[in-house]
Image (cartoon, rainbow, N blue to C red):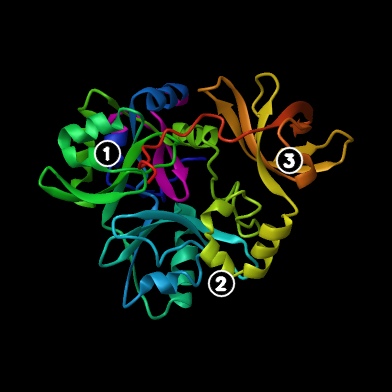
């Protein structure tokens, strides 16, 4: 990442500079990679509440007679069964069953909304418009997106808007802060409990400052967001997901419900259903490295007999478990927990062990089982 004068800025840009954020160019946006340090911000999120600016991500709205049915033509998640106020994880798929993007879809009652990855905004919207011509698709550029994450996020936000305490994981509602209507969901990408807030751009700075006034809350940057999602075993588009990787290879089969598998009416269904029933040629796994040297993405992997064993897709240091963690794509025969592999890290062999995901347990505030 390098700074770029041509990069876009978010509505919180001046606040980031005021807080001495170390700014970098990420997917064409100027964003803070850290403030006081990645490990400190990571730890604060695990123990209290961290505020992330994720306004670089795209917000797309879908309106029409039945946008959910149209959306199911390109997304294998169950969207026609998504109740108002509920959120579901899914994918845009190409005709070969690869993932164009992964996204979160919310049923807002009178319309659907999806949050998409920043690096895929210029790809996703034309693709969706082409495949869903009967749907009115609007990309919003007048909102900021903040993620308040950590076990004390509920304490901080409920002090200002008590109704958020009643939300469960993957539920959404509307609240008011500083006389501003804000869409809030109990969701995030750190493995922790927390919220994501969609805020009118002209109110984002004031709302962020109000949140930072809460004793539980500190600002955190992209660096901590990445280490948190890696410890949580969550995919990063461009690393663990791309247009050549299927949801089954990425170990995300849980996101395709039985009804959609039986209908098979989505792009790449032939490949995906074959992999679902017969197994893929590679699969995403967790990897724990010996020693203290992080194993980075694109490091090649070898099996016990020196055979090719795929490559690392994401890697770094896990502050919570105090050791290097990674994820990679390996052949099924080498995917069993406890399998020993060798990673080539800049010409040096680093032993790694296939391990369970996530590395740090998810702590979502889930609804009680019926």
Alpha-carbon span between mark 1 and mark 3: 46 Å
User: Mark 2 highlights which residue?
Assistant: 263
Residue 175, percent across and down?
18, 47
In the image shown, does 341 or 39 lie closer to the viewer? 341
Mark nearer the viewer, 1 or 3 = 3
Query: Residue beneath label 1, please?
Result: 14
Residue at the limit of the structure toward the right, as seen here: 305
Q: Residues within 10 Å of mark 3 (few under 14, many from 20)?
A: many
Decide: few, some or many residues near mark 1? Use Cα within 10 Å; few <14, some 14-19, many ≥20: few
- Percent coordinates x, y for residue 177 in the rendering: 15, 43
Question: Which residues, given as a range, are shown in magenta?
Answer: 17-38
Mark 2: give few (<14), some (14-19) or many (20+) Cα within 10 Å: few
Residue 331 in sight here: no
Q: Is residue 252 left or right of residue 141?
A: right
Q: Is residue 135 left or right of residue 217?
A: right
Question: How far from the left and from the top, in percent, is residue 298?
Answer: 69, 41
What residue did someone put label 3 on?
335
Q: Secondary structure at mark 2?
A: helix
Q: Is residue 27 above or below residue 3?
A: below
């Amino acid at each position: 990442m390098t700074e770029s004068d041509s990069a876009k800025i978010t509505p919180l840009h001046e606040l980031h500079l005021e807080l001495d954020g170390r700014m970098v160019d990420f997917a064409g946006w100027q964003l803070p990679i850290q403030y006081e340090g990645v490990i400190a911000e990571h730890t604060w999120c695990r123990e209290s509440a961290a505020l992330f600016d994720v306004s670089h991500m795209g917000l797309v709205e879908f309106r029409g007679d039945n946008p959910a049915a149209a959306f199911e033509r390109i997304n294998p998640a169950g969207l026609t069964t998504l109740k108002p106020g509920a959120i579901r994880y899914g994918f845009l798929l190409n005709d070969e069953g690869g993932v164009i993007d992964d996204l979160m879809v919310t049923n807002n009652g009178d319309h659907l909304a999806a949050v998409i990855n920043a690096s895929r905004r210029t790809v996703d919207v034309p693709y969706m418009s082409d495949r869903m011509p009967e749907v009115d698709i609007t990309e919003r550029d007048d909102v900021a997106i903040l993620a308040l994450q950590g076990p004390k996020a509920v304490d901080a936000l409920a002090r200002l808007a008590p109704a958020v305490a009643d939300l469960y994981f993957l539920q959404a509602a509307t609240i008011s802060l500083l006389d501003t209507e804000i869409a809030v969901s109990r969701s995030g990408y750190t493995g922790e409990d927390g919220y994501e807030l969609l805020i009118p751009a002209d109110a984002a700075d004031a709302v962020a400052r109000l949140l930072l006034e809460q004793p539980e809350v500190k600002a955190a940057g992209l660096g901590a967001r990445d280490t948190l999602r890696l410890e949580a075993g969550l995919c990063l588009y461009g690393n663990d997901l791309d247009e050549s990787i299927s949801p089954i290879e990425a170990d995300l089969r849980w996101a395709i419900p039985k009804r959609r598998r039986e209908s098979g009416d989505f792009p790449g269904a032939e490949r995906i259903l074959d992999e679902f029933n017969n197994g893929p040629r590679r699969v995403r796994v967790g990897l724990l490295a010996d020693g203290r040297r992080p194993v980075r993405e694109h490091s090649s992997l070898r099996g016990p007999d020196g055979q090719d064993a795929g490559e690392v897709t994401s890697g770094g240091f896990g502050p919570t478990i105090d050791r290097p963690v990674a994820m990679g794509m390996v052949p099924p025969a080498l995917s069993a927990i406890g399998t020993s592999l060798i990673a080539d890290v800049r010409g040096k062999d680093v032993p790694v062990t296939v391990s369970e995901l996530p590395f740090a347990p998810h702590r979502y505030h889930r609804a009680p089982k019926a």
